[in-house]
Image: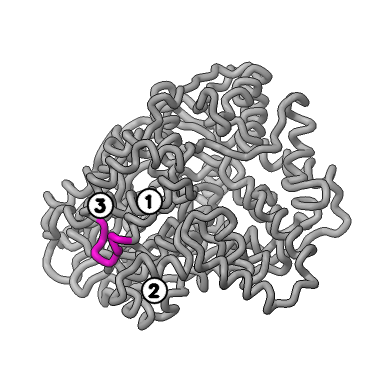
């Protein structure tokens, strides 16, 4: 796991010192080493910050060139099947000098070109320079993994291209992109290719971008998509559990392979408990586990984590959340470039800091909900569809219209206002942040008018999720594909990346193994995910086989904090500090209204936290080092 960065000039040679300074803003991602490569004409610079995990020798340093000198790469991530690929490539005549998966990546590209990423089972974002050959121009390839585990930002101008693992390494100062601001207010994250900084883009998951270095033209295309759904009607629950265990156990085994100490982030939920069980079965020595405790609070799941740790004989580490207050924002703030409204960033940041004291690699439970139907809203939506199928649409629309005009934070407002679009699309239109009506209140009139002139208008965030929803072939398939393509990469995986890399910790997600993704979305019937007996049926069957019978997994919290309580206790002082840094398009009077509503008992904590993180991000972007 590392930080990558680089630039291409379409004119004069690049000045190296500012680029090295930008690289070193990513030192938290790669505290072990730093390197750079500059082309003979000075117009291409690739830089790298290294977190040493596989092949700790100098042979694993980056940027790395292949033996011919034609290909140069900077790589962030891990290719878990690199040993098998090394054997295959060796049989084709490739000679290897190191044990690094980066060298395997280079050899794979030399052998298979742009098709190489399809062979990789892993998480990655990389920039690979093809210096060309007679008849083939030089090109730069930017590639991102299937699920979007690793981030990649880029900016293309008339004279220069820049890319980096984090926005802070792309020189500013930056202004706020209005379309991305609208996205963020609606969703609590900035989705897809959009970026909060105007003129910067993110490479979406499963995509590659090819830059022609002679013309400066860039083409972005998708190299991977979720498989077409072809469920096996003869599959039983036992069959599905057998297949899932087979894949997941191998996925855990591959991710436990490392030249540095490994552990598991154990929240006490079903996903991380299953990973812990299989890690204990795979590893000969006791697994180290790490969790987050909130004594006396309803969100506390530490007792379950301790029970799982006890059952599998792990070396268990626990951090008490007495210090898990919003006061930690002052420590987290310098790392915030693109805003994220997910307040579980705070406990995730704390647990990752705890884990890094003992290990360099930790396994997490991300992905299980999207693959196996784990979110409670899936079951609620399916129940609502059955209950409301005889209710005339005009009645639903009327109820929704009335609810939308209630004050923010009134209990039930979001769910009722989303009924206008049907119960299944409540996952899109029942936002806990700012729906259309609230965005019209929050944004100044000029900003609303400017948004209405953009493609998609004010409704752009919801429309993008509606398109994801429409890619499914059943209600449940539509909901899971929507989450896999949006909130998973742009919220949950972004949160894990930022929280872990802040401490130089690599987090690996076995449930996002390529084989498991394609099995769950391509072959597994809906009825084995969510049914009358409840949700995540396959995982519960696996739990019955692997986990202690006395552990109740009916609740789902993960690492989280009581955001309404926290914002009531500490939010006012934080807002006095950060409110001046909110973008000009946000109406301050509406922020005050939200604060008053929170004091009156309304559930506005998430909205206010979202605005707080937006203010911090805007401050960091506008104060960013200038371009050179």
Label 1, label 2: how many angstroms apart (C-alpha)? Answer: 48 Å
> In the picture shown, does residue 13 fall above or below 125?
below
Q: Earlier in the sequence, mark 1 or mark 2?
A: 2
| One can see residue 275 in this view | yes
Q: Earlier in the sequence, mark 2 or mark 3?
A: 2
Q: Is residue 147 left or right of residue 127?
A: right
Q: Is residue 463 magenta?
A: no
Identity of the residue furthest to the bottom in this view: 453
Q: Which mark is residue 596?
A: 1
The structure residue drawn at horizontal position 18% and vertical position 53%, both measured from the top left corner, is 624
The structure residue drawn at horizontal position 19% and vertical position 66%, both measured from the top left corner, is 9
* Element under disc 1: helix
Label 3, label 1: how many angstroms apart (C-alpha)? Answer: 15 Å
The structure residue drawn at horizontal position 76% and vertical position 37%, both measured from the top left corner, is 542
Dot 3 alpha-carbon crowd within 10 angstroms: few under 14, some 14 to 19, many 20 or more: some
In this orientation, which residue lies closer to the viewer: 469 or 602? Answer: 602
User: Magenta region, mostly helix, strand or loop?
Assistant: loop
Query: On the image, numbered disc 2 is attached to which residue?
Result: 219
Dot 1 alpha-carbon crowd within 10 angstroms: few under 14, some 14 to 19, many 20 or more: few
Quadrant where the image shows the C terminus: bottom left
In this orientation, which residue lies closer to the viewer: 83 or 590? Answer: 590
Label 2, label 3: how many angstroms apart (C-alpha)? Answer: 39 Å
The nearer-to-camera label among 2 and 3 is 3
The nearer-to-camera label among 3 and 1 is 1
Residue 301, horizontal then vertical, whole percent: 59, 29
Residue 237, horizontal then vertical, whole percent: 83, 46
Query: On the image, numbered disc 3 is attached to which residue?
Result: 579
Q: Which residues are magenta?
A: 582-589
């Amino acid at each position: 796991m590392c930080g990558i960065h680089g630039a291409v000039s379409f004119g004069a040679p690049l000045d190296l010192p500012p680029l090295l300074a930008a690289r070193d803003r990513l030192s938290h991602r790669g505290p072990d080493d730093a390197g750079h490569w500059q082309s003979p004409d000075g117009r291409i610079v690739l830089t790298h910050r290294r977190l040493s995990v596989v092949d700790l020798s100098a042979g694993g340093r980056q940027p790395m060139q292949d033996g011919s000198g034609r290909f140069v790469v900077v790589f962030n991530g891990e290719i878990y099947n690199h040993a098998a690929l090394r054997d295959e490539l060796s049989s084709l005549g490739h000679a290897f000098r190191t044990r690094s998966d980066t060298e395997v990546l280079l050899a794979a590209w030399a052998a298979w070109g742009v098709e190489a990423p399809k062979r990789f089972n892993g998480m990655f974002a990389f920039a690979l320079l093809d210096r060309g050959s007679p008849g083939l121009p030089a090109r730069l390839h930017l590639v991102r993994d299937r699920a979007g585990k690793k981030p990649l930002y880029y900016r293309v101008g008339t004279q220069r291209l820049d890319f980096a693992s984090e926005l802070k390494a792309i020189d500013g100062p930056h202004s706020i992109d209005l379309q991305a601001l609208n996205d963020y207010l609606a969703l609590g994250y900035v989705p897809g290719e959009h970026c909060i900084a105007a003129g910067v883009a993110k490479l979406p998951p499963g995509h590659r971008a090819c830059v022609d270095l002679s013309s400066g033209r860039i083409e972005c295309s998708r190299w991977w998509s979720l498989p077409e759904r072809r469920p096996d009607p003869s599959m039983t629950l036992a069959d599905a559990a057998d297949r899932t265990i087979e894949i997941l156990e191998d996925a855990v085994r591959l991710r436990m392979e490392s030249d540095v100490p490994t552990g598991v982030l154990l929240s006490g939920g079903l996903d991380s408990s299953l990973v812990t069980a299989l890690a204990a079965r795979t590893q000969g020595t006791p697994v180290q586990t790490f969790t987050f405790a909130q004594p006396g609070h309803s969100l506390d799941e530490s007792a379950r984590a301790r029970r799982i740790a006890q059952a599998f004989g792990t070396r268990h580490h626990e951090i008490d959340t007495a210090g898990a207050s919003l006061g930690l924002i002052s420590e987290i703030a310098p790392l915030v470039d693109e805003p994220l409204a997910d307040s579980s960033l705070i406990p995730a940041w704390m647990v990752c800091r705890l884990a890094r004291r003992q290990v360099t690699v930790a396994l997490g439970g991300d992905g299980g909900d999207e693959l196996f139907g784990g979110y409670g809203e899936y079951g609620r939506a399916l129940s609502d569809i059955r209950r409301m199928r005889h209710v005339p649409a005009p009645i639903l629309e009327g109820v929704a219209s009335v609810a939308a005009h209630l004050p923010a934070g009134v209990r039930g407002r979001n769910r009722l206002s989303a009924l206008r679009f049907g119960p299944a699309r409540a996952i899109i239109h029942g936002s806990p942040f700012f729906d259309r009506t609230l965005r019209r209140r929050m944004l100044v009139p000029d900003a609303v008018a400017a948004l209405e002139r953009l493609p998609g208008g004010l409704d752009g965030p919801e429309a993008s999720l509606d398109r994801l929803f429409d890619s499914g072939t059943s209600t449940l398939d539509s909901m899971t594909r929507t989450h896999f393509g949006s909130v998973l990469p742009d919220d949950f995986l972004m949160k894990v990346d930022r929280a872990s890399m802040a401490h130089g910790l690599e987090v690996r997600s076995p449930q996002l193994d390529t084989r498991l993704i394609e099995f769950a979305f391509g072959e597994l019937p809906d009825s084995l995910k969510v049914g009358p007996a409840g949700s995540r049926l396959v995982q519960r069957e696996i739990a019955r086989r692997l986990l202690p019978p006395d552990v109740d997994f009916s609740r789902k919290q993960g690492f989280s904090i009581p955001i309404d309580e926290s914002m009531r206790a500490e939010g006012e002082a934080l807002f006095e500090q950060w409110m001046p840094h909110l973008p000009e398009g946000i109406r301050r009077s509406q922020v005050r209204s939200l604060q008053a509503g929170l004091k009156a008992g309304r559930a506005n904590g998430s909205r206010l936290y979202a605005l707080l993180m937006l203010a911090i991000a805007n401050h960091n972007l506008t104060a960013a080092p200038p371009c050179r």
